[in-house]
Image: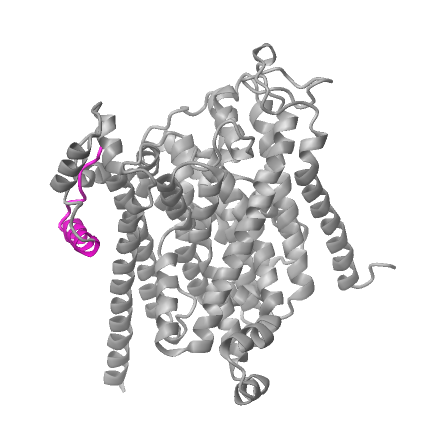
Amino acid sequence: MAFSDGLSLKKAQFNILGIAIIILVLIAVFGKYIAPHDPYLVDMSNSLRPPDHEYWLGCDNLGRCILSRILYGASASIFSAFIIIAVISSVGSAIGIIAAIKGGTTEKILMKINVIFQAFPDFILAMAIAGMLGTGLRNGMISLCFVCWTKYARLSRSLALEIKDADYLRSAVISGANSIQIMFKHIIPNIISQLFIMAALDVSGIILSLAGLSFLGLSAQHPAAEWGMMMSDCRQYLQIAPWTVIFPGIALFIVVIVFNLFADTFRDLLDAKGTKAKI
Amino acid sequence: MIENKVKEKTKFFGTKLLSVLIIVFGLTFIAFCLSYLCPSDPVELQIESMGMVPTEELVSATKESLGLNRPFIVQYFSWLWNFICGDMGNSLLTGKPVFQEIMLYLPNTLILTLTSMVTTMIFSIILGVICAVNVNSVFDYAVRVITYFFASFPGFFLALLLLYIFSIRYNLFPVISTVDAKGMILPVSLLTFTMSAHYIRQIRAIVLEQLNRDYVTGCKARGIPAYVILFRHVLKNSLVPIITLMGISFGGLLGGSAIVENIFTWPGLGKYALSAIQKLDYPIIQSYVVWMALIYLAVNLLVDVFCVIVNPRVQNETEGSVV
């Protein structure tokens, strides 16, 4: 049997999910070109038009094609999450690694700042920051960056502390390597796979939080096509036109579950030590 | 020996208290800084909202009366001192004292979150333990698939669907939640579903880890009945990680309650705060953020104290806790 052992089954699963992710990313990139209609075109004669052969997923209250809006919105959800993850994972791990290398007062201060940010319920602080900065997708992203970096600092610090006393690091220090060389040449290559796992596990949560902020009207602005905002805009039509809310919701759900499955398989394949235990 | 232990305990709680004080200072500072994030001047907005033209003299006079011309750090400490004394400023729009308003809505939020916490715990401990005991059975597999499904399901989407099915289609519950048992069913079950999806998996893992320990094999070898092993040993040992888990994820529950309150129009702090956020009424936003963080902190402190009492070994392993 091809899948006689668990590992090759996992690898097959990983490949399939990887392809699914690539398809989602391609949709996010080329959504603009494959959208059948203009997602911003208001046409009241099509208001709340049910799904049919011309408008596959129906139209919203302003007569805008829901399928086109979902396709346009894919990039707002997926790429924003990627950008947020790139920012928080690099800033967070830099803080954690610096704390681990420097030790002493620097470590104490950095970790105290980390703990203070953790003391807030994540979503509530994000709501407050996004609200004060003013609405807009960019401000929603900034607010999530402020809130979500803490786990990366904690994880990278504990990982860096583990290898800090290894012989090869000591010999590097004795040979005169400075902190920056140690950080980039020795520590980061050793812990990057764990950070990747954590970043992969984080994507779906970030997508959901961002959609949640938009749903509350604190992130994306009109008339932008963003899934959370589409659902919030049409919620009063749920009774007479359920497709206006259900299709963006399903799109969001598919993206989130694909990223979740991918991240879990990725972790199972790469991580023999168990990243979760250290978070 | 006993003296030493008492000393250790006092030291443990002493350092905890100190670290809590530092955290409270830090989090109030961040909350205070929130008002400086606003790109437009809140004072001008306030004057505009009262229907006046924000001339330079008027703005500076208002700033003077609000004490906004003083140095930043002086403003922070006077704000903090007033906050401790229970004066959290007045709403910029309505002029009402924020403290009274918060006290009006806070109990509703607490009722909602604490009830959801309790139901989540009951629901997920029962299912998690059954799954762990019958590991790899059909039931276990089904629960794992369902929890995976719900863990990926956007909470607000599920909320809208529940509202549609139960309130609009079948008219079983009110669309606008009232603060009573009937109005609570939908919001509480939504929070329970979404939280349990994460909990059941983790509780299953915790119990499974205990079941694979040597002491369980030892108990089995001595002929102790399975239910005694489960209830007297395994569950007792799983209690600390489960309670810790509960403390850490309470923040998620508070955040989730903000969305849930807005969808089910539950008259809680989350709904009140969102309308304040939309109007940039920053005294309310600051108080909301601080209160939520303090509640989260208090829950985690209680969890820590509880864990030390149940299992003194925890004292040395506080690395992962929030506080």
Principal secondary structure, stretch drawn in magenta: helix
Of residues B316 and A25, the one nearer the viewer is: A25
Of residues B306 and A251, the one nearer the viewer is: A251
Of residues A103 and A250, the one nearer the viewer is: A103
Q: Specify whether residue B76 is painted magenta.
A: yes
Q: Is residue A221 in view?
A: yes
Q: Specify whether residue B271 is painted magenta.
A: no
Horizontal arrangement in the rendering, residue B156 relative to residue A79 (left or right): left
Q: Quadrant of residue A51?
A: top right
Q: Percent x, y for residue A36?
A: 70, 24
Which residue is depicted at the point 33% across and 28% down?
Answer: B178
Q: Percent x, y for residue B137?
A: 67, 54
Which stretch appears magenta?
B72-92
Horizontal arrangement in the rendering, residue B262 relative to residue A245 (left or right): left
Horizontal arrangement in the rendering, residue A226 relative to residue A54 (left or right): left
Position of the N terminus of chain B, as image quadrant, is bottom left
Q: Is residue A165 above or below residue A157?
A: below
Position of the C terminus of chain B, as image quadrant, is bottom left
Q: Percent x, y for residue B72?
A: 21, 53
Q: Percent x, y for residue B112?
A: 35, 40
Q: How many marks?
A: 0
Q: Is residue B238 in view?
A: no
Which residue is depicted at the point 29% across and 50% down?
Answer: B33
Which residue is depicted at the point 58% across and 14% down?
Answer: A43
